[in-house]
Image (cartoon, grey):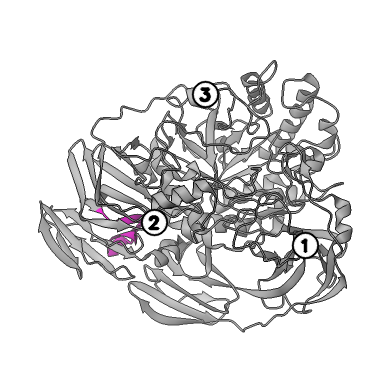
Amino acid sequence: MKHHHTSALALALACAAFGSHAQQTITVDAAAPAGDPATGYLKLGTAKSSTGQILGVNNRYLTLDGKPWMPVMGEFHYTRSPADTWEAELAKMKAAGITAVASYVIWNHHEAQNGVFDWKGNRDLKRFLQLCRKVGLKAVVRIGPWAHAEVRYGGIPDWVVNGMRTRGNDPQYLRYVTRLYRQIGLQLKGELWKDGGPVIGIQLENEYNLVGPGQGAEHISMLKKLAIDAGMDAPLYTVTGWDGAQYPSGEVTPVFGGYPDEPWAASSTELPPKETYAFRFDSRVSGDLGAQTKSHGRGTAESDIDRTPFLGAEYGAGLPFMYRRRPVVSPDDIASMLPVQLGSGVNLMGYYMFHGGRNPQGGTTLEESTLSGGYNDTPAISYDFQAPLGPDGQQRAVLTYLRPFHHFINDFGSRLAPMTVRKPDTTPSGPTDLKTPRVAVRSAGDSAFVFVNNHVRQYALPTQSLRFNVKLAGGAVAFPRRAVDVPNGAYFIWPVNFDLDGTRLRYATAQPVARLDGGADGITYVFAASGRIPVELALEDTGAAIETRAHKSIEGGATIVDGIEPGTLRALTIRRAGGRPVHVLVLDAEQARQLAIGDFGEKGGQRRLVLTNQQAWFDGGKLQLRSVGANNLRFAVYPALKQTPKATTVLRAAGNDGIFQAFEATLPAKHLQAGFTPLREATDAPPIQKGGFAKAALQPIPEAWRTAAAWKITLPADALKDVDDALLRIDFTGDMARLFDGTRLADDWYYSGYGWEVGLKGLAQRNELSLAVLPLRADAPVYLPKEGRPAFSGKQQLVHLNKLYLTPVYKITVSP
């Protein structure tokens, strides 16, 4: 949903956006050669695995066994998630197209007391990495010592903060960092890349921009030495490159990020258009990413731009809620960043966070807060982050919007990675220019991809009537034949001179998603329609027969296929003498969001396409389906299974859905209700104070909870019988809320209008639940989304428990 704003800047931008726009041809000169990638500058650890694989890096991209390699990395914090769920959650990430998992080692989660380390249960890093290996995911371990991660003291234990100078080469501090690193090294032993394990990278420190004696590049050099001495020998050593980062050039590789809003900002109103939605042609460093320390100098990453590849680590797959600012993001707000970042040259799409979680508790709660000197106030327990996978493993809508892009990267990233960024003849003057089309091209030789973004969070953009003229070494490609209207909110990637296993696709007004080898049945290329933009494919005439139900014509030495109706039937088939057929499948946008790809079938599985509205992932050739609320589960698979599969319930053949073989299952419906009774009424909440480093709204002090309203929650005794889980959704109006499991603080939440869900499986004493809610004051100087801000109707404060929803979660396993 797009929002309208009353600020002068917003009104001016909105007025400009709705001007009249004639047809435009965006011209991009991509004919000049880019030059060969350079190697040898970056000092790597052992690059060869015991299995013989070699991971490399040059100044433009990563390589795997000498070939360009573009991973997709997602952050998942093992200490913020139950250990007995790790394997399934990692498998869900893999099915979502994630190829590498990043995770902080948060020091105060492991050594709350001096010399007493805890690597058991939810803190068992070695087991987490072993499961990454088992599932087939690579790993990047972010070893700190300072992590940030919205954790108390950035993850450094209280006894360290209170006793010595941190984040520099102070001898006392380094003595304890050395001990920590040795402990981490023991956890990583046997799981490093050189040992055949998943760990391909080690991140040192985080958001580090301190300068001075024993700091800056000198400190990062020391941390790298200590890590290596502790046995942490990995191909990549990384540091975050934003906010004026300081590091020793050549010793480490910078990684970058960007977010669609700034929860850490002090503003209580909407922000101007974020540069996250604007293509970058001259820099990799986005604006403020929330580093706790400030730097006014030029970061090392700026001078390293020609020496290092453009790798990401913290592109927001969601946003956290902070007390003073609680922005809610839509799936489009997140997914539209992908064509922008890829079109700007990113060669590793790394997300923070991809999986939400909850903070553990020690002698104190471990969240970042102004009470402990932090810049931000964050929930004590919740680290939901609006992530694609919620803390209880639930799939959010944003995951389905991201997944087609991940499939594209997984299957065609080797083509994209060597391509260099080319700037169009017309570009916006800056992030606040909402009139000029937002376009970029990446090319290598005669092939290219065109990246278009017409979405900016909270701002409407005009419909753009566009054609493209991409000038390549072998000649220009102008397309489509007639300008197409790109509406507000649209974003996509279109190919130019794209190889379809021997047939050149001159262009397509649809996005490539995947390539599937169906054996004797041929090769299938999957595309996704870009909304309602007409699908037009142009194939160069090579003498092959092209079969299609759509309109076909010959123009300029190419076969033009248009009038394609997106769906589950093949759009066309290319037949060449002596070769296997090549099929093109064009799904509509909604079907593309239902597409999961993984190994499913006999003998460990064959790579297949699965269409389903349910949450889907793969495990040892089996298909796992999970459904929140709906007891009817349906999936369709291509290529067809050789025999009717079995399932943990009765599975029915449901005919064919185009080229897909469909199945259905119905589980016994479970109707669950939660009740609540008042324990105490709210009293007048104290005024919200301003202060702290941000000079903004401060979270109420703990004693303010005496003014909270409270309710007892009652659940059915058999709520978890015959279901995978049950999600308790708490619909309340107020400022902050806390859920207690007995006397244990189980979860908490800042009100924003975004739905709060808690899985019952994670609650130990489900018959002793209670809820406390602090009133929301009408004069609270906090940012709430317009659709979430309640009407006070003259009242000074609001507090109400509107409704409790208890939703069953159904699950089946399908075996070949």
Which residue, as the protein is rendered here, is positioned at the far top?
A: 213
Confirm or deny contact between disc 3 and disc 2 (CB under 8 A).
Answer: no
Q: Say what amino acid the circle numbered 3 marks.
A: Lys
**Is residue 508 shown left or right of residue 631?**
left
- Residue that appears at 72% across and 47% down: 124
Residue 43's tag is 3
Task: Please state the extent of the stretch shown in magenta in the rendering.
Answer: 508-529
Q: Position of residue 371 (x, y in %)?
A: 82, 42
Q: Secondary structure at mark 2?
A: loop
Q: Write down the residue under mark 2.
A: 490
Q: Secondary structure at mark 1?
A: loop
- Residue that appears at 52% across and 22% down: 250
Disc 1 from disc 3: Cα separation: 61 Å
Between label 1 and label 3, give the one nearer the viewer.
Answer: 1
- Residue that appears at 66% across and 75% down: 807
**Is residue 224 shown left or right of residue 457?**
right
Q: Is residue 41 magenta?
A: no
Between label 3 and label 2, give the one nearer the viewer.
Answer: 2
**Is residue 175 shown left or right of residue 626?**
right
Q: Say what amino acid the circle numbered 1 marks.
A: Gln
Is residue 759 shown to the viewer in this render? Answer: no
